[in-house]
Image: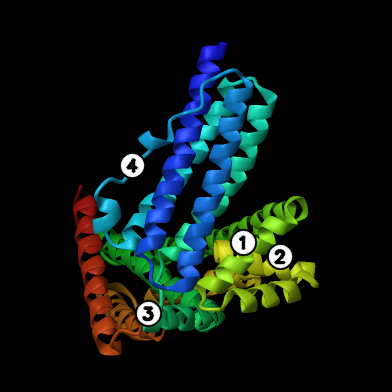
Amino acid sequence: MDEVGVLKALKQAWRMEMEGAVTYRALAEREEEGGRKAILERLAEMEQDHAARWEKRIEELGGEPPDRSTVKSPLGPSLHLAKPEVIMRRLEAQEEEDIAAYERLLEEVGDEESHRIARDAILDEQEHARTLHFLAGPPHGPARDLDRILRREKWHVRSGSWIGDAIYGVNDGLGAVFGIVSGVAGATHADHRYVVLAGVAGTFASALSMGSGAYLAAKSEREVYEGELHRERKELEENPEEEREELELFYQLKGFTPEEARMLTDRLAQQPEQMLKMLAHEELGLVEGQLPNPWVSGLSATLSTAVGAFIPLIPFFFMRGLPALVASGIVSILGHFAVGAAKSLVTTRSWWASGLEMTFVGILVGAVTYFVGVLLGVG
């Protein structure tokens, strides 16, 4: 890129930062809560600092300083009319767009000093996006308190997640093999040899598929956590002061005064690993204690799916022909109702409504697969 192109790119970067500063200051003027107002003003100052560095670089390269009087917020009238939370969601997306613009600048502009400014700006824009994400949540009062309580209560759901996995495993196994049993029975006039063979094969296939899927999903979730933790650790090592400031902002968003937020951050800074985990939790919503154990998830899904899948087969070990099929349908429908009722433990729905819903699903699956089997058998 020639000199003219470089100056044009730097002026665009300058305008991008100035527009951000104008927008954040306008939002700060609208904000009544002191903590949020201070955070927005701080974001405006950081954008202003970036713009000042670009302005200086433009002058060093022989360019004319941009005209500040022409800078306006790109949000226009909505900046003063829309709800602050809506604007912050838009600004969060804008910060991501600014990061992409800076990445393009790094590719197109060969000036090393400009690269340094752009890289610093990218780190700050990433922090801004995370901060805006929190600011766009419940701002104050009962809504914020409820949000905090619900986050604290998440351990109830996570601690019982294996129960939920087991219930859904039984549900999947029961539904899949009941469909197989009904279909094969319809095609073979309920010949128990074919029904049992197909049912047992379906049981093993469903159980192993569900178990391996649950194991890999839990393992991937843990790997994502470890990868994010590694990146956060690197940021903490390279920019400790910025990370401390970021954590202070998060505490202020939770309702602490700047002094209280600073005191809490200072305490955490004395225990780097705890500070690292706290940053991961506040920024990314990641908590190590909430991660599922891959082996527990896999084993739970495998066994529960096998149990559910075995239910429709039971009558065929003791009976033959149509009576066995009828008995299988009865125990499977009852099983569907029981599984639906058990789902209320993790969904908070009425147990009988959930049970009836699953009963209907079971009847539908059995009827459709049976008639498909009859058609294929006749063919």
Measured in 3D between alpha carbons, the distance from the residue under mark 4 to the one under mark 1, in whole angstroms, is 26 Å
Horizontal and vertical percent position of residue 183? 28, 61
Measured in 3D between alpha carbons, the distance from the residue under mark 2 to the one under mark 3, in whole angstroms, is 28 Å
Q: Amino acid at mark 4?
A: Pro
Disc 4 versus disc 1: nearer the observer: 4
* Residue under label 2: 276
* Residue under label 4: 74
Q: Amino acid at mark 2?
A: Leu
Q: Is residue 149 left or right of residue 274?
A: left
Q: Amino acid at mark 1?
A: Glu
Measured in 3D between alpha carbons, the distance from the residue under mark 2 to the one under mark 4, in whole angstroms, is 36 Å
> Badge 1: few (under 14), some or many (20 or more) residues near its Cα, within 10 Å?
many
Disc 3 versus disc 4: nearer the observer: 4
* Residue under label 3: 143
Q: Is residue 44 left or right of residue 186?
A: right
> Badge 3: few (under 14), some or many (20 or more) residues near its Cα, within 10 Å?
few
Which secondary structure, mark 4?
loop
Which secondary structure, mark 3?
helix
Q: Relative to the observer, which residue lies in front, 355 or 366?
A: 355
Disc 3 versus disc 1: nearer the observer: 1
Label located before the other in sequence (3 or 4): 4
Q: Is residue 108 visible?
A: yes
Horizontal and vertical percent position of residue 62? 59, 17
Measured in 3D between alpha carbons, the distance from the residue under mark 1 to the one under mark 2, in whole angstroms, is 12 Å
Label located before the other in sequence (4 or 1): 4
Tag 3 near tag 4, CB within 8 Å: no
* Residue under label 1: 246
Q: Measuring 45% from the left and 37% from the top, which residue is drawn there? A: 16
Q: Is residue 294 visible?
A: no
